[in-house]
Amino acid sequence: MSRKYRGGRRLVALTAIASAMTLIAACTASPSSTTSNGKTVLKVAYGSQFVFLTPQLAIKWWGTVAHEFEKAHPNVTVQFVPIPGGYPDIVNKMSLLFRTPSTAPDVAELPAGQMGEWVSSGFLLPVNKYLSTASYWNQIPKSVQNETLINGKYYGVNHGENTNALWYNMPMFRKAGLPVPWHPKTWADVLAAAATIHAKLPSVTPLWLAGGSAGGTIAIQYNGGNLLAGSTNSTIYDAKTGKWVVDSPGLRETLQFYKTLAQKHLSASVSELLNPNAVDGLPGLLAKDNTAIAVGANFYAESWVKSTCGPCWLQAPKIMGVTKLPTINGQGAGYASVLGGWELSIGAQSAHPQLAWDFIQTAQQQTNMIDASNWGGWVPPSNVANSAAAFVNYAPPYQKFFAALLPASQEEPNTSPFTVWGTGFNNATGAIIQNPNISIDAAVNVMKNYVTTQLGADKVETIG
Amino acid sequence: MSISEFTPAATPVGMAAMPDPPAGARLDKKRFNWSSIPLLLPALGLLALLFVGPVIYSFYLGFTNDQLLGPTSKHFNFTGSANLHRLVDDPVFHQSLYLTAFFVIGSAVVGATLVGLILAVAMQNALGVTRVVVGGLVIVCFVLPPIVVALAWYAASTAHGTYTGLFGMPNADFLQSAPLLVVSAANAWNLTGLAMILFAAALRNIPTEILESAEMENASAAQRFFKITLPLLRPTLITTILLMTLLALANFTVVYVMTAGGPGTSTMILPVYSYLQAFQYNNLAYGALIGDAMVILATILSFVYVRLSRERS
């Protein structure tokens, strides 16, 4: 054998050993739960772009809480895990973080939706034993507390909630001869007002109600979900049978509302309603002064103030009124609103659950809770906080109004199949928006076929 | 004299002696060069780590009940062919296959390849300035990030957009009324620059003497193109179609940003459906199986194209 080949084999062996050593070193490196100076590291994961009204407000709030916590716990360092992107990105990234012990956060800011899935995954620690130290806990309405109640245990505390109502343009109403303040009692009253606006002010959009799948299932809690909550039968998931409702009087009433709007040209264009920004972009749209009525959330008020400027609309209190979205016939509480909130939870694998709870307690101190709600576009869950001057006066006169909706607002199901159900619902509303002449039966079938295909025929039902 | 007693004749008188053969391995056959291994090792390692390993794991995952979020997210099990049965019976998957075929053939095979070829041929005889400007613009379309492509086409094809205005229908919404066509056009618009570059390079390698001879023989421009240029472009054509096909098959961003697979499921191509199942419905295993279907599809198409290109050579 020539010397050339012996040298080649030596080189092969050396390269293989070097590569293997590099690989082993890379694979065994892992983050430590203590810093180099021996302090305990507490990992806190949160949505850095989507949750608060601006990323800067998120940094400011979390920074304040961390500073206060570290001051009270000098041997602890807070390590933030900010998650950029939208709602699905937060859910996905959090899920991936929780799957590995070395990356699982101690404290996580989680959406109330799918809370059942977080719990069934085994990712979260029950907090029942800590609640006795939470002075604010009994100030939170049962409906909000129950967002994290799974099989008798609570898995987090609410950080802030959204509620929904009807926004209306007062000058447009006066011009059209409609009453201000406006207090519709039924859906028929709402449609009548929209028809009047359409007749008297043809250049404006009478009633904005987004639909379709572009906004995702999160958008349902800000548009059609509120109508369904106010219908004669708002059941989405039948807990008795364990099945998802794909046809009901309530669903048909909701779809009929969409159809009436589309057929009588009482809403915006197809393009605008099916736009992915049809919900989040509404504060900006209302500020352009060309929409008379909109089904929308409380966070618009907090978007318009100077400290948020999303956009800046300081004249909003003189132009935009708010009124409760009535139930279809005025039944029940007389109004409908869907809850949409964020929870602070402790990771099941946290090595420092008590410290994690202490961090949550710091975050939930009244000043921090109010700041979170003002900067996050929420209503504070505590009825003491949501009636405090610091919250009420942040974006008057809207804050008090939306806080009052909290006790009777409804939660949507919090398990994964809701995403499938929601996609089916969005497909049905989108079909109607695109083709107003489609029959309600056909629209219901769009939803029924999709959800049945995805979940199985044994997981769906028709009621009524 | 018997054969065993035969000895080769000595070099005949007057002829020069044959030189001794060179020492070492024979050079008339390809042999593996062992000293190339250290040079190949990093690439092989990356290939194994970033491609082979994940693909094998993805195939395994497709036959489990792994979830992103849910009771089987931490501890999942092998479930045999359950997911496969689901895939076979899933009407959305069947629709997705058809939509993907339309998208790939329409935007890549026909759209980008054809337009790229036309542009390359047209630019051969164009003025220098025209070639630079048009070529530059087309290449810019190719190098734009997919998110920019998606947002630009979204703005242009919805109400009050550029295209709706150009067609004199400012309130029309092309994206909602013909979603698959619009996303296919967006993808073709994005990929055309690459096809044009490949064809332009191939056209430059066609000997001009052949074309000049044909011209002297009174062959028309169409005859010269179809009888001479196109056959000589066949290897490039096949390579380009393969490249465009694979790029279109893997396209996710443009379609997801523009329509998220909607309205309804009208643009639910395989990559979008795989993402929806894995990351919105938390069915990680089922999403992986749909991805596996894409890998198999891409592999089959690659074999077909490679076979077609080998037949000629």
Image: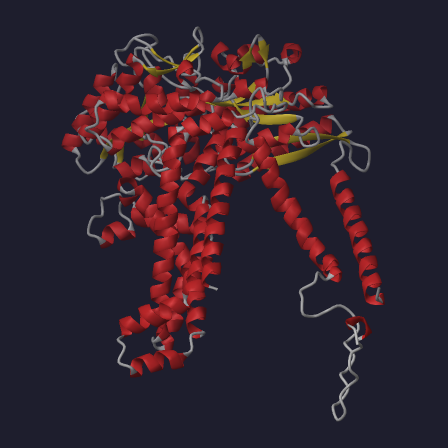
Residue positioned most to the bottom:
B14
Residue B232 or residue B281, whichever sits in front: B232
Numbered marks: total: 0
- Quarter location, residue A217: top left
Q: Which residue is drawn at 26% across and 31% down?
A: A433
Decide if residue B274 is in sight here: yes
Residue A229, given in percent of the width and then of the height, sits at: 35, 16
Q: Which residue is drawn at 83% across and 58% down?
A: A10
Residue A267, given in percent of the width and then of the height, sits at: 24, 31
A410 shown above or below A454? above
Residue B48 or residue B143, whichever sits in front: B48
Residue B77 or residue A311, whichever sits in front: B77
Q: Which residue is drawn at 22% across and 44% down?
A: B171
A178 left or right of B304? left
Decide if residue A394 is in sight here: no
- Quarter location, residue A159: top right
Residue A454, given in percent of the width and then of the height, sits at: 42, 24
Residue A398, given in percent of the width and then of the height, sits at: 39, 24
A76 shown above or below B256? above
- The quarter of the image holding the N terminus of chain B is bottom right
Residue positioned most to the front:
B1
A413 left or right of A234? right
